[in-house]
Image: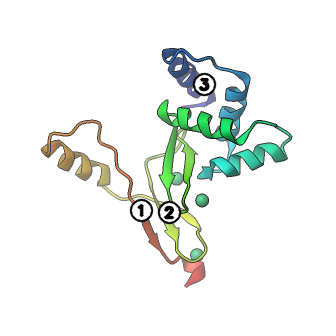
Amino acid sequence: MNLEETIKVYKDFLKSKGLLYTQPREVILKEAMSALYHFSADELTSQMHKNGINISRATVYRTLASMKEAGILSSVDFGHGHIHYEAKKTKKYHEHITCEKCNAIYEIQVDNLAKVINAAGAKAKFKHIEYAIRISGVCEKCL
Ligand SMILES: [Zn+2]
Ligand SMILES: [Zn+2]
Ligand SMILES: [Zn+2]
């Protein structure tokens, strides 16, 4: 999804909820799409404040949650006690591995993982299967 498509998906989602595509929502969406991968709501808020954009933390939290619900962001839990988000736009499917010492985040491909999980879920007669896997270790630099 490019930015235009992403905006369209989000607008359609908001409309379906009877909500408007307001200016703060647009600003947050654009910031989120241009942010580094794996940002937390706090990190995005500080980045915006640094750039002179004055939107409250609470609005950022709520908007990011709705963008996740709209399917344009995915969330990842690295065990930091808060959620990290990343834009779905151009990224291929991947999992994350974090370093226990420096908290660095790497993206890795795990072959057939989705397939295996979906097949196991289907066997139990589940649909719309989602999963989250936390993988950690010690990175090369910290060894
Ligand atoms: Zn974090
Ligand atoms: Zn490390
Ligand atoms: Zn990632």
Measuring from the top left, give residue 129's x and y in whole percent. 29, 42
Q: Is residue 45 left or right of residue 53?
A: left
Q: Which residue is mark 2?
A: 79
- Give the amino acid type for the residue marked by disc 1 in the picture: Arg
Mark 3 element type: helix
Q: Earlier in the sequence, mark 1 or mark 3?
A: 3
Q: Is residue 77 above or below residue 14?
A: below
Q: Residue at x 55, y 33 (%)?
A: 67
Q: How packed is label 1: few (under 14 Cα within 10 Å), some, or many (20 or more)?
A: few
Q: Is label 3 or label 2 in front? A: 2
Q: How packed is label 3: few (under 14 Cα within 10 Å), some, or many (20 or more)?
A: some
> Residue at the right extreme?
52
Q: Tell me the CA gap for discs 3 and 2.
A: 30 Å
Q: Is residue 74 left or right of residue 7?
A: left
Q: Tell me the CA gap for discs 1 and 2.
A: 8 Å
Q: Residue at x 67, y 35 (%)?
A: 59
Q: Which residue is mark 3?
A: 7
Mark 1 touches mark 3? (CB < 8 Å)? no
- Give the amino acid type for the residue marked by disc 3 in the picture: Ile
- Give the amino acid type for the residue marked by disc 2 in the picture: Gly
Q: Residue at x 60, y 36 (%)?
A: 62
Q: Is residue 110 left or right of residue 53?
A: left
Q: Which residue is mark 1?
A: 134
Q: Is label 1 or label 3 in front? A: 1
Mark 1 element type: loop
Q: Earlier in the sequence, mark 1 or mark 2?
A: 2
Mark 1 touches mark 2? (CB < 8 Å)? yes
